Amino acid sequence: MAGKQAKLEALLAPVVESFDCELWGLEYRAQGKRSLLLLYIDKPDGVCLEDCEKISRQVSSVLDVEDPINGEYTLEVSSPGMDRPLYRLEQYQGFIGSQVSLRLRMAFEGRRKFSGLLKGIENDEVIIEIDGEEYILPYELIDKANVVPTF
């Protein structure tokens, strides 16, 4: 699945960038006969509905021509939202000092889920503080990460 996702990112990132947006992340989920392709787009001053509509139309045209997805699929284009997922290590940098929720591929120090304050990034490791204790987690162990909105 990661190979297909990388191919889709390579194909679609230039389309998104042509609208002065960034492809924040992409999720491809095969769901039986009908798959789901989620594109998260972002830009410095925020994404509006019009951005999503324009990019959705253009991406749909590219997908129709290139045909990288077998069978039927649903395409959804949106902003990453307040609880934005973090897909790449460099994305964590912008959220140092924020609350994050992490799920690991395998247990680290006896647990797979961590939720706390993102303290920093060093040498491909994510530093998170939970109840005053720092955990240094290897980035390659992280399966899913989200910013946790605080109000």
Image: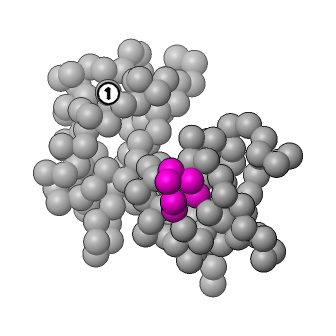
- Identity of the residue drawn at 18% across and 23% down: 65
The answer to whether any part of residue 101 appears in the image is: no
Q: Is residue 26 visible?
A: yes
Q: Amino acid at mark 1?
A: Lys
Decide whether residue 123 is among the magenta residues: yes
Decide which of 98, 35 is in the foreground and name it: 98
Image side of residue 110 versus residue 23, left or right: right
The percent coordinates of residue 10 (x first, y second) are 26, 34
Q: Is residue 131 above or below residue 4?
A: below
**Splitting the image into 4 quarters, where does residue 4 fall?**
top left
Q: Which quarter of the figure has residue 140? A: top right
Quarter of the image where one finds residue 143 = top right
Q: Residue furthest right?
A: 110
**Residue 61 placement (x, y as % from top left):** 19, 33
Figure label count: 1
On the rendered structure, is 151 left or right of 58?
Answer: right
Q: Please say whether residue 145 is one of the residues in the magenta stretch.
A: no
Q: Is residue 19 left or right of residue 48?
A: left
Identify the residue shown where x is 74% and y is 37%. Answer: 106
Q: Secondary structure at mark 1?
A: helix
Query: Which quarter of the rendering shows the C terminus?
Result: bottom right
> Residue visible at 57% across and 18% down?
32
Q: Residues within 10 Å of mark 1 (few under 14, many from 20)?
A: few
Q: Nearer the viewer, residue 31 or 88?
A: 88
The magenta stretch is 121-126
Q: Position of residue 93 (x, y in %)?
A: 44, 65
What residue is shown with label 1?
7
Image x and y of residue 52, in percent? 30, 55
* Left or right relative to 7: residue 106: right
